[in-house]
Amino acid sequence: MRRMFGRFSELLMVDCSHKTNRYNYQLLTFMSVNEFGEGCVVQQSLIKPNGDWHMERAIAHFKRSNPTKIDQLRVIVVDKDLNEIRVLETNFPEARLLICHFHVIKYLKEMRSKPDFGKISGEDASQVDALVHKMVYARSEENYDETCASLKGLCERIGIQGFWEYFDKNWNSCQDRWTTPTKQLKKVRQFAYDQFRGAGTRPEPKPLRSQAERYREAVRATHLIANELADIDDEDEFNTMLEFILSQWRNVRQRKIANTQADDADDAREGIQSDSNPARGAQFDDAAIKAEFEISSSGDDDTGSNEDEESIGVESKVKIRLNPKTRKVGRPKKDKSKTVVSEKVDRQWFEAMEKGRKTAGEVTLEALLAALLTEEPTLSETQRRLSGVMVKHNGADLKKPQFKMLKNPVLIMDAFYILPPKLMDACMKVLPLANTQSSAISVDEDRTKKKSQTERLTECVHIKGIGTFLRAQIELFKRVQNLKDTVQLGVDAHKWLLEGGLPSLPAGYHDLVRKVADDVEATFPYRLIPGLPQLEDYQYSLLYRAVPGIWLSDAAIRAVCERLVTDFPSCRFAGFVRAETTKKRTRNTDEMLVDSIVRNRISTQVAESGVDTVFLPLNFMNYHWCCIVIKVQAKRIFFYDPLNQGPYRNSALAIANYLKISGLSDYDVVSQNNPLQFDGSSCGVYVAWMFIRQGTPVPALDMSKFTLPRRRFELFYYLLTGRLLPIQPVQAVGGNLEDEEMEEKPPAPTITQQRNEEEEVPPTQVSL
């Protein structure tokens, strides 16, 4: 022990193991480290309490054992015990005290989990541990200060300000003892471990060493042997070991390996044991060791021990056979490998969320959403900032969330991410309605009254394996997800305007298309469209659904009707009707197909003077669009199905007949079968152009597959500006579309004819 500290006396490691035995004695250990990173125990002291007096005695003994090398001590590495640090500083004023990184991370984790600072979720706790780990291994003071500020903000957000106050008082003030950038110590290569280059791939064969590399390894081994031989004080022992080394060298020189370890061991055993009795040889060994290290025990004073009893005890040893199937006592061992991997994954997630916060420019989702709604940046800037919000727990789509009412729930307070779409939809489904008839919010109610037991509980959504979230958090996740989806639709719409809408128009309109595309890219999705009523429904986001492959929303249909009503005073919008298809051969005559409010509104609008056209869109379960147009002057009720399929057409016919018998008895019901839809997502576009065609003096249009992109851009431009592009009548095969429009329509098909048609609804695109 003293030999090791005499050779390497610059560094000393001190640690105190608690509860060594049943009397709670503590083992105080002093260790030294050589140039190859190998440690050796220098002194061990068994002390009762970890107090100043006992520490002083142990240190005084250490100084007496190493009187000549104690002045060369420069660095002492200790654990987190502040009592040890104070005593060591007093006795070694010239040495610098450093705290072990392992103990710093472990102790701060234990302090964080104490109930005095508050109970937090496991996910928030992993973020605190990741910040502590990052501060310990910070590469610069700027990185440490930035991480320290992040820890302060995190503690404020999750409600453990007491932990930050403790850390700032006890650890931040002595950061030079446990942080990497403030140590300014030279990095020794022997203590660094480089990752294998072929990690994750098949290991390659190790290359052969060159002559220079072999020489360096041989010199290193020779230096190790020479240092050990030079420290031998006994001349005879030195000669014996030197002769042994030379004999081994002769064998190496002759290219052979001689196994002389067994013979040397026998010779050494014969030289040490003077008597054939093994017990006496063992006693001689103990006596020699005690004499060398100046150790005395109470057994040395008892000289009257009976040697015969000792020999009998040695010869009659009791053999105990242990049962391998015996149940082990105590807590099972913790799988450290899983813990290390889990902590590493948590640190990786934390680093990814920190990068996301820097990209978003905010530290919370609430602040990010509020900043975007206030600043209203461009579409690309909004997408860039929202890219910092990641989707976590992608493998939890099939988990079933549970709605719970808890008094003091342990929540995930600092979640800078969103849940997967399927899991988020499941969470929204389990949440009850906030304002129902049984729990309606009253304006005149006195809110200062004492809340009931139910009102004191908190609405939470618990997801097994993930955590617990508030209702407000789930709604916030959904708002962020909706904004991300809307921004992506806007980017796709901007791309279609330049790649799909621009080639479909003449060259004279290309500059107009580019201008519209730039306007879409430079506008925030939630900004209101000028010229339309200032309602939340009429935002730029409704324009994104006028592109191919997306179902046109009800807000876009209503915006078209609002534009027509504003530009043409003879037009009116009656409202939406939720229609359904049925497989029954007959309908219930008492069934109310149109709501009474909509029916009364239609009757009022038809009776107004100057009104010629009334629009009534039909929504089939958010799956398909049809419409009914009432022409007051012509006394006709047109019903139109873009797909011209039996189930939808029969439902539209039933609604038209219901309007006829509800107050429009002198009107004729006419089927409108042109134009026909050829895909599964353009029904809203066809209905919108049917309204434009019936409410304006626009001639018949070509809605074929080749001209549909142009019609989409014209509809897009009309929704945005309220102006229709100049439209020229087109020639149809076999005649003029205007002549076809002026042609007398056949009478509406009877109920009997409709029954013979197929009642099954062919598959079309599901609405988004």
Image (cartoon, rainbow, N blue to C red):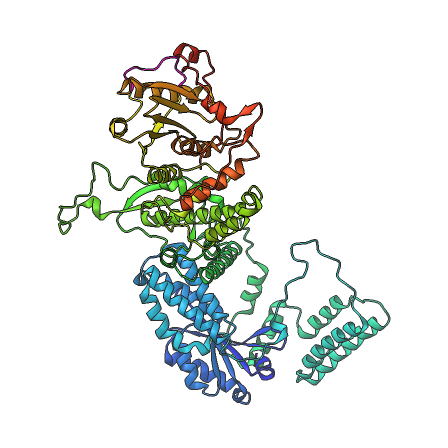
Asked if residue 258 is positioned above or below residue 316 in the image, the reply reads below
Asked if residue 120 is positioned above or below residue 58 in the image, the reply reads above
Image location (x, y in percent) of residue 479: 38, 48
| Camera sees residue 25 | no
State the predominant SS element of the stretch in magenta. Answer: loop
Which residue is at the far top? 752
Residue span colored magenta? 582-591
Image location (x, y in percent) of residue 642: 46, 27
Is 194 on the left or on the right of 263, as rendered?
left
Residue at 43% x, 18% y: name it.
745
Residue at 35% x, 64% y: name it.
155
State the quadrant of the N terminus: bottom right
State the quadrant of the C terminus: top left
Examine the image and state in which quarter residue 722 appears. top left
Residue nearest the observer in this picture, 230 or 641? 641
Residue nearest the observer in this picture, 13 or 205? 205
Which residue is at the far right? 254
Residue nearest the observer in this picture, 623 or 127? 623
Image location (x, y in percent) of residue 594: 30, 25
Q: How many marks?
A: 0
Check if residue 586 falls in the magenta segment.
yes
Asked if residue 405 is positioned above or below residue 24 in the image, the reply reads above
Examine the image and state in which quarter residue 753 appears. top left
Residue at 83% x, 71% y: name it.
251
